[in-house]
Image: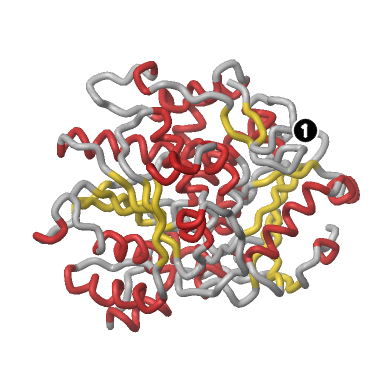
Amino acid sequence: MNYVSTRSKSPPVTVSQAIDAGLAPDGGLYVPKLFPNYDDLGFQDGEFDSVKALAPFFAGDPLMHSLEDICANALNFPIPLRELEGEHNSGTAVLELFHGPTAAFKDVGARFLAECQARLAPASASRERTVLVATSGDTGGAVAAAYHGRPGFKVIILFPKGMVSTRQLQQLTCWGGNVSAYAVRGTFDDCQRMAKEAFASPSFARDRNTALTSANSINIGRLLPQMTYYAKASMDYKKKHGAEPSFIIPSGNLGNSVAALWAKKIGFPIGQIVMATNANHAVPDFLKTGVWKPQPTINTLANAMDVGNPSNMERAIHLYPKFADFREDVSAISVSDEEISETIAQGITEGNIWCPHTATAVHVRETIPSDHWIIVATAHPAKFETIVEPLIHQKIPVPPALAALLSKPSHFKEIGPELREIVRD
């Protein structure tokens, strides 16, 4: 299996090379040159296996020999598919992706990527690797947890000052050791721009005597494992209900949505993909007009989705060269802060506590009359207690893994939105 750049100006590479580089030399994002066919994956009696699903993407690569161990170490926490109760919730399930160590779906991709990169850069390597990540809230914490204490790695986290929740901030800054966190005076798009500038600047890595790699969703090692939960959920749902489900996905930088589109491309039983966005509506606007136009970031209650220029739109457009085909499979709906708040407040009446991001998908589901939908729940509501608890008028139990992080001291530096302000250490 080879991987090519979305901009088609870089030579094909192996999956190890794509994971190691993060970004293609031409500034594009790596994507599979070809996609396997579901019928060739060898599933028996509808039983899902993550190694079988991912094997074609690692074929011919040294990492293939370790794929079983990588999956066992990274994908080792539950991802339940919970049926919603109530007459008006008929045919609706919730895919809970927040049972990992940092209580967000980013744990899947971050842990898988760390396992891959640890095998590409063993502790005996002569040059340290720096993992650079821009985060709008959840990615940084998941990456920090996945790489903290790993020999041969440093982590640099860039996050927008004042635009993450209190508990997200704690998850980003409680590590110390080989993890450094920077509060950037700007938006997530500024953080993402700084990260891309670092990869485009040979001097950034050279001056630090390090090899630079990415753990953002620009790195294909994040997206490949995310396909597995869409694949398994779709198979399980169809086995139970006899129909292929469609997915409603809270969407910011679009990595999670692209992973679902790739699973659909392979042939897993997936219907429509609905991207639920917050007030940052570049994607809904694109689907209306056919013109891609990034926008300034708007701050919302669903802060991890506050992205005005999502990087992974390049991958989506590459997958669908014809706009008409894209519109046939994908729709996008923007959800306001008022609608997010109302959805959270109403959810508790049926025993459901939603995080602000999941609430965007729940609200969208309430506007769709048809059956057979899976709502993607991307984060545990306890990470956003200052928003959720006043709306539901009760305390949210904190998962043990999250509680352990909240008890640690916090360390970070504040910088301007310029790459040169990252300290050389």
What's the residue at 72%, 38% (across, down)? 24
Q: Quadrant of the N terminus?
A: top right
What's the residue at 21%, 52% (across, down)? 92
Q: Considering only vertical position in the picture, is 164 above or below 239? A: below
Residue 79: percent from the left, percent from the top?
34, 46
Tell me, yes or no, if residue 400 can be seen here. no
Query: How many residues crowd around disc 1 within 10 Å: few (fewer than 14), some, or many (20 or more)?
Result: few
- So how many labels did they put on this image? 1
Amino acid beneath label 1: Ala
Tell me, yes or no, if residue 291 can be seen here. yes
Outermost residue, left side: 87
Identify the coloring. secondary structure
Specify whether 344 is left or right of 74: left
Viewer-proximal residue, 397 or 267? 267
Tag 1 secondary structure = loop
- Residue picked out by circle 1: 125
Q: Quadrant of the C terminus?
A: bottom right
Residue 160: percent from the left, percent from the top?
64, 70
Specify whether 233 is left or right of 379: left
Specify whether 366 is left or right of 100: left
Q: Quadrant of residue 115?
A: top right
What's the residue at 46%, 54% (across, down)? 287
Viewer-proximal residue, 261 or 117? 261
Viewer-proximal residue, 182 or 333? 333
Residue 233: percent from the left, percent from the top?
30, 40
Q: Considering only vertical position in the picture, is 392 above or below 260? A: below
Residue 400: percent from the left, percent from the top?
39, 61
